[in-house]
Image (cartoon, coloured by chain):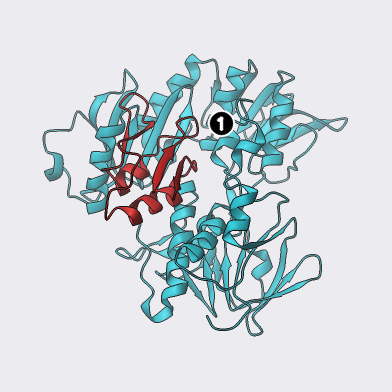
Amino acid sequence: MHITVNEEKCCGAGQCVLLAPDVFDQRDEDGIVVLLTPRVPAGQEAAVHEAVAVCPAAAIEVRA
Amino acid sequence: MTTSSGVVVVGASAAGLAAAEGLRRSGYDGPVTLVGDEPHPPYDRPPLSKQLLAGEWPPERLSLRSARDYTDLDLRLRLGVPAASLRTSAHLLHLADGSRLPYDTLVVATGVRARMPDGSAAGAGTHVLRTLEDALALREELSGHPRLVIVGGGFVGVEAAAVARALDCEVTLVTGGDAPLTDVLGETVAQVLAEVHREHGVRLVTGSRAVEVLRERGRTVGVRLATGRVVPADAVLAGVGARPNTEWLAGSGVPVGDGVDCDVCLYAGDDVWAAGDVASWPDAVSGERLRVEHRTNATEQGQAVARNILAGRASATAFRTVPYFWSDQYGLRIQVYGRTRGADAVHVVDGSTRQRRFTAVYVRDGHVVGALGIGMFRPLRALRELVAAHAPWPAAHAEAAVLDRRG
């Protein structure tokens, strides 16, 4: 599974970081999402899908 | 879930979409129908008072999913048609166009609508800001650089004030409090933000109640305050709160108070569940009844309802959340976890209110109930843990208090 994030859409809510801290982080200056890895780590699939669903800006996409 | 009527979600909203998507994600393959009174597929509301109003984003950008996504999700969309009434005994939803939809399970996600001040009506230069059409109408109005009077000191009002100033409109904001947002953020933080608004040229009329929107020859010309004073206006935005869309549930047996009265699992009885702004539920710990109008709450509750529908009533789990919302004003991002309203003390933890870059915790009865950050993303996330744990204060962060104001 391949993850992409849209920094333009990101609103800096940080919900993704709370759910999958090994995959997502936030920039210090404005809270915009930082993708730590485009590949979903083993065992993190559910957390990443949850992050996609809960993102208030629909800024995260996961493709098979 | 063996019969064929499936799940009908009333409200093509963030909450309704999350419920529908949650069902599919968990493997539910029965029919799922999403009914909405607006003509649009689910869209995002927070940008309405921010990027859309400012003209930075086109309306299309607010769509939460693409047309392709709805096909992939196999959702039936019934848009532009409000729900009219519900017969739970027959498991039938009646729509305003006269059609009827049978269901096995119903999800109420009909949200809220903007209130108007008593005796006032929208139109002719008087606006509310809840729907895409509301926002586009206000945006059009602001392009003529009117003298804008905002009635109400809530988030919609202050965000619109910031945008209107950026668009070079003359802005007066009328609020009953000592500053906008005082009741929700407390005096310390509200005063910091009020100062920012003043610096940007917003005239704040505090401690005042607007009683009437004045019109002459069919146009909005001003706002009369309780004191009798008249504030002249070319346009008025009423940001005085919202009320739940529950009228269509009258006589259905679905319990309605301030919203749909659910249990801790968001279940309202008779195979009806509720999610989002319209749902009221008792907090799993305190028992206090909550109803939250936040964007992230809509998604979380929609997902929770989907899980509980599939689990079945006997295995349904209580909805638990740390509420979160954010606000953008003049390039400042304000983020809040938990519940700041009703706190009895606010403590600044990091940073400085003077620099408008700080975090603060909200304490009630000796426990952390909320945390706020302006421009401090990582430190705020750490404080979220204290909110989630309902941590005792000051024991949880004894050295941190820089400021302690009762209010």
Q: Which chain is cyan?
A: B
Q: Residue furthest right?
A: B217
Residue at 22% x, 46% y is B386
Residue at 71% x, 52% y is B38
Q: Chain of mark 1?
A: B
In the rendered image of this protein, does residue B353 appear above or below residue B251? above
What color does chain A have in the rendering? Answer: red
Q: Quadrant of residue B90?
A: bottom right
In the rendered image of this protein, does residue B182 appear above or below residue B145? below
Disc 1 is placed on an element classified as loop
Image position, residue B143 (x, y; %): 72, 21
Asked if one can make out residue B113 in the rendered structure from this viewpoint, the answer is no
Q: Nearer the viewer, residue B59 or B153?
A: B59
Image position, residue B91 (x, y; %): 64, 80
Residue at 80% x, 34% y is B124
Left/right placement of residue B219 relative to residue B70 reads right
Left/right placement of residue A29 relative to residue B196 reads left
Q: Quadrant of residue B220?
A: top right
Identify which amino acid the numbered label 1 is placed on. Lys
Image position, residue B121 (x, y; %): 75, 43
In the rendered image of this protein, does residue B246 appear above or below residue B366? below
Asked if one can make out residue B207 in the rendered structure from this viewpoint, the answer is yes
Left/right placement of residue B173 relative to residue B368 reads right
Residue under label 1: B50
Image position, residue B184 (x, y; %): 42, 41
Q: Quadrant of residue B81?
A: bottom right
